[in-house]
Each structure stands twice: as C-alpha cells, then as structure tokens.
Image (tube, coloured by chain):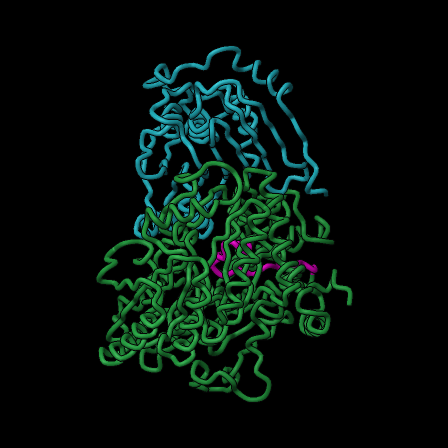
Amino acid sequence: MSEQNNGVLPRGVTQQEFNAAVEKFRALLGNENVLVEQQQLVPYNKIMMSVENAAHAPSAAVTATTVEQVQGVVKICNEHRIPIWTISTGRNFGYGSAAPGQRGQVILDLKKMNKIIKVDPEMCYALVEPGVTYGQLYDYIQENNLPVMLSFSAPSAIAGPVGNTMDRGVGYTPYGEHFMMQCGMEVVLANGDVYRTGMGGVKGSNTWQIFKWGYGPTLDGMFTQSNYGICTKMGFWLMPKPPVFKPFEIIFENEEDIVEIVEVLRPLRIRGIIPNSAVIANILWEAGSGNVRRSDYITEPGHTPDEIQKQIQKDTGMGAWNLYAALYGTQEQVDVNWKIIVDEFKKLGKGRIVTQEEAGDKQPFKYRAELMSGVPNLQEFGLYNWRGGGGSMWFAPVSEARGSECRKQAALAKRVLHKHGLDYVAEFIVAPRDMHHVIDVLYDRTNEEETQRADACFAELLDEFEKEGYAVYRVNTRFQERVAQSYGKAKRDLEHAIKRAVDPNNILAPGRSGIDLDTYKS
Amino acid sequence: MSMDRRFVLKGMALGSLAGLTLGGALPALGAAHGSPRSSAARPALVLVNQGAEQSAFVQGARATGAAVQVRQIGGDLTDLLSLQSQLGSGRKMRLIGLLDDASAALVVDMARSAGARVEWLGQHTARGGVTRHRLLNTASAEGCARQLGRQLHGCGAGFELTEERLGSAAPARQLSAAPRNQRHADQWAAGIGYLLGSLGAGRPTAAPLIAQAGAPLDGSFVSFSIET
C-alpha cells in the first residue's frame, strides 16, 4: 500500500497525524478511494490561475459513495483536524477547477455519488446527487422521452447541477438563475448531522422539491458559496419543454451600441417578453467561441488593437456586440412576442436580426441556440484557444441592467486589461434587473512575466471596480479572500460567527469565500 | 516554503550539460524507423488535433518503436464523450498527446474523473522560433525535463522551461537558452513525443531528429501522459 510521500500536508498537520487520518480513510472508503500518489493527484492540480500549481496542491483526494461515508470522512477530519475541500464534478474551470483552495487540503471528490434519484416530469423537478452531470441528466431525459429541459452553464455536458448551483452559477434558459430554481437540499454538517432544507425535515413529506421555504428560517442560501456543510442531494426545477423554440441573434456593429441594446432589452426582460437569460457577447468572446484564434490576426504581445477587432468583425460578420435570446411557448405566444421584439429593435434603427433559419449550423449561433434550448455542447471551450497558454480567470462583476452602467463597466474593464496587455473578452448575461458581466482574463501560463501581469491585472480590476461600488458575484480561489473584503466587516464577522458555531474545528473548506477561522481577524 | 524562489539553471550551465549528450548533430529519424530505440516502450494511444497525424509529436512517439495508434481529436462533443467512456471503461490504457488548450482541458479533466494517473502534464507555447514550456510532473517523469532541456538546447531553438514537481518542497526548476538557429524548429514537439512515448522505459534519452515538414508549429499546446 502506498504511503503519502508527496511532501504536501494540510496546514498545521504533522505527517504522523496525517498518516493516521489516511489509514482511517482507507478503512472507511477502501484503498481505491484514497488517492495519495503523485500521479493520482496531478489531475487535481491542473489550475488556470496566476500562481504556481504548488499553491493549490492537494495532499490527498478521497472519494465517497454514500452519505454515511461523507459523515465518516467528516468524523475523521474532526478527529485529526484535517481540512477538506469538497468538489462534485470539479469542472469549475477558471474559478479554481478541481484544485483545493489552499495547499495541502484533502479533496473530497463526490464524483461517484452520481445517482439521479428522481425526475418528475409532471411536477417538473429533479433530485440528484453531486456527481451527476448535466450530460447524464440530458441522456436520461432523452432516453425516457421526458417533456422537460435543462438549463446549464457552457461546460454543460461535463459539469453538474449541484456544483454549479452551489457556486451560484447561471445558464441561458428561462431557468438560467440556477439557485432561484433550486428546491431542497440535503447537507452533511461538520458535526455529522444530516440536515434537509425546506420541507425535507418533515417525515413522509412529498413536497421537498415542490415548496422551497418550509417553516422558520430558510437556510439554503447559507450553504452556497460557503463552507458550512457538504451538499449530498439537491432538488431543482425543470422547465417544461416548449412546443416551439425560437432562438435569435441581433448583431450590433459598434462598441457604443451597448447602451441602447440594454435600454431596449431591459423592459423586454422585466415584462417577460424575452424570458431567458439572454447574452450580449463582445467580439472577442464571439471570435474565441467561434474558433478564431488571436494568432490568426496578430502575433505581437499585448492586447488586441481595436482595428484588428474591427477586421475580425469584417471577416466573420460578427458584431462588436452580439445579442442572443430565445422565445419559448406555443406558436401563438412566440409569434406575439417575436413581433414585439422585432418592432422594438426596428424602432432603435440598429442591429441586424439573425434567425435560426438564416444561421443554419454556423457557429457561434449553433452552440448558443443549443445552450438556450438545453442541449449540451462544449463549443465555448474554444475561448481557451483565443490566446492560448492555459491561463483563464473569470472576472464577474454584477452590473445594473442599465445601458450607461454597462458601458461604464465595459470601458473600465477594457482600460485595466489593456494597461496590462490583455484582452477584454466579455459577455453580459442578462437578468431582468441585473447583468452578470463575465470577463475571461486569458493569458499564457508558460510566460512567467505575462502570468504576473495577469495576476496584477486581476487585482487591479477588483480594486478599480470596488472604487466605483462594484463587486464580483463569484471568484477563483486565488482571490477569494480579497473579494470577501469588498463585502465588508459586518458580513465577515457574521460569517465567521456562523462558522464557529457549525464547524468549530474549521475542517470544511477553510478559506472558501474568505471564511477561515485560522486566519480571520475581526 | 516560498513559492517564488527559483532554482535557475541558465544558458551556460545547460550548454555544458547538453554538450555531454548531444555533442554534435542529432541522430536522424530515418535511422530510427523500423529499428526501435527503446524496445521497452509501451503501446500508447496518441491524441493529436485534426490534421496532425504526421506531426512532429507523432513522429517522436513513433520513433520509440512502440506500437502507437493515433487518434485525431476535434472539438466535437461526440469524440470527447467517446474518449470519456473509454477512460471510464476500466480497461487498461495509456494515452499520450499534444493537443490545443481547449481539447486538452477536457481530456485531462476526463482523465481525473475516470481516476486515471497523470505522469506528465505540459503547457507549451511556440512562437517565432522560440518555445516556452511549463511542466507539472511526477517522480515517474524524473529526468525528462532535463532531457528535454538538453534536446531543446541541442536543436538551437530558444526556449524557457519551468518544471514543478507535484508536492515537492523544492522550488520550480527553470532552464532557458537563447536561440541560435531555426533549423529544427519543431524538434521540441518530437522530443516530447519521444519522451512521453518512452516514459517508464528506462532513463530518458534524446529523441532522433525529425524531418521538418511544412511550416513550424506555432501556437499553444498541452502535452500529457495518462494511464488508466
């Protein structure tokens, strides 16, 4: 049996103590579920952030297959003060991937807890374990010919609903705000208790996935983006598959058009005329996900000049901004809403409307239409080839859905990125009132100097946005402590008070969202 | 441990190391065809992007004499899901590859999900005749980075190479050299193909020189060696 000899230990844990815990993990989970060899841990250490891999190297990874085993893992961790970093599918690319937040943390990989417990096509919900992928669910729905559809983020097929929802990720359908569609979760607490939210604590209840709130305090949100428990089951609502689905794109030629796009779009979203999480992607996002590479146009280092971006627009027919949205419903409903949308954008006098019939199989239209209709694909991974080099960190500030605000954020981000020789590769994901302004900070990790620039750039983006009253809604593990500071002392004090109450040994993902009893000083 | 400390082995020192093994010209690949350099090299499935079935990397892998089967990977979901299902089938397999960033991100992560072992993970950029390499390795790839450094130096191409060993307390190793000529611009890819093809078959040795076909490789790539 191999010993853990890779030189990485959890913070403050001796080799002897660690080995004792590993032996207990083996007794509980079986040897094959306790990974300590370097070759087994390398794939958990592939990161895209602007630090050395060593900063996020795991000491071990363990896989559990039952709730009882998760409880057992937590017990061992308490006995030996071992910090664990839980992942479900580990596909949080650009936010930390599968690597632990801190060097030495043991990864608790729930990929083998992958049962689809229930899909109810009448009440339109699913209850799943953390290792279930969207691809698995999609296949299940197709094989059983169920009249429901999924909403997922771009890594779709290989990512999963539990991980995405627990990190408050978003998708592109009318059910795109995933946490809003979550209904009922089961959580293993640090003391080993199994807690069910909402109606889940009521014996014999059949409304756990039906009614979110239950009785008394509603705690679901407390377990998202946090380290207060380990989610072992989650329910979420599924959208009925509509008889008619009509995706469309509106292409805008100029960067400044963002103001008018948003001003026309917001009322359409708030009134529900456009029901889905629409997207406004800029030219470089569009190009990257459409298989264009920066090196096709320019090989000089630094940001891609505006004239090159214009040339890409000219060559590809892509816009400076590209709005994607869709209509869902009966033919009559779709026809009515389509007329309203066309009239509104005609009034604007800008924007070229492209329908599915016109676009055919052309990318990126095809993959956008698939994402908006719950069909998985991996097309957006093309962004990683735009600049290449394996560096990617999502900078995702929240914006008001107001044209002037979007323009202000876009200009600010572009200025900071260009100052550091990097590109503004962005999309706005459009909710009725807010925008998730998602920017992929892409850089070359083989270039030490560029990696340092990307690191400084990300820090400056956070600083500059904070000065304007903006903050991100989610961040990679490199910058989680910094982002927690943006949200203020009172929030952090309360979060740590809760942490002391529910996880006094600080074993669950210390450092997650800046919550760490060992390092936080009020 | 300071993550920022570096052990730097630069040009001159590397030159002397390279001189030990390379001396003069690299052996030509032609001589290696049909006469395996390392009979212990194990069979492997070689993953490359579309159109790269005769690439320098594949030539390097073939030069080990091992039985190699080449599979071209496109961005298509079906390709990748089929690979995922193979990785998860429980059958023993060995994969080596040189892919674009997007495809490699998926392949390596699928390997993790399948519980596969990854002995070598390399990020590479080739631009204007200069290459940069960032490796994340394990003890089973011991000596490979140094051998690759010697090889790159021998070829005359400028390069920078950083190697992190998972979990090692030692700081990352860095090697670099300025370019001297562009004659063997793609030799880096052949060298990696050869190293990965012969991984686990004894002490790493220099790859034979490949025939340069067409324009040199340019862009960003990821190399890997995966075993289930």
Considering depth in this image, is A41 or A101 the residue closer to the camera? A101
Chain A, hue in figure: green
Furthest residue in direction right, as rendered: A521
Chain B, hue in figure: cyan
Q: Which percent across, then down, holds residue A495?
A: 68, 72
Furthest residue in direction top, as rendered: B24
**Magenta-highlighted residues:** A80-98
Look at the image and say whether residue B189 sits in the magenta stretch.
Answer: no
Look at the image and say whether residue A97 sits in the magenta stretch.
Answer: yes
Q: What secondary structure characterizes most of the magenta part? A: loop
Residue B122 visible to an observer of this rendering: no
- Asked if residue A173 is positioned above or below residue A299 in the image, the reply reads below
**Location of residue B11 by image quarter:** top right
Q: Which percent across, then down, holds residue A78?
A: 68, 64
Q: Which percent across, then down, holds residue A212?
A: 49, 83
Q: Which residue is located at x 39 percent, y 21 percent?
A: B210
Q: Which residue is located at x 53 percent, y 51 percent?
A: A441
Residue A285 visible to an observer of this rendering: yes
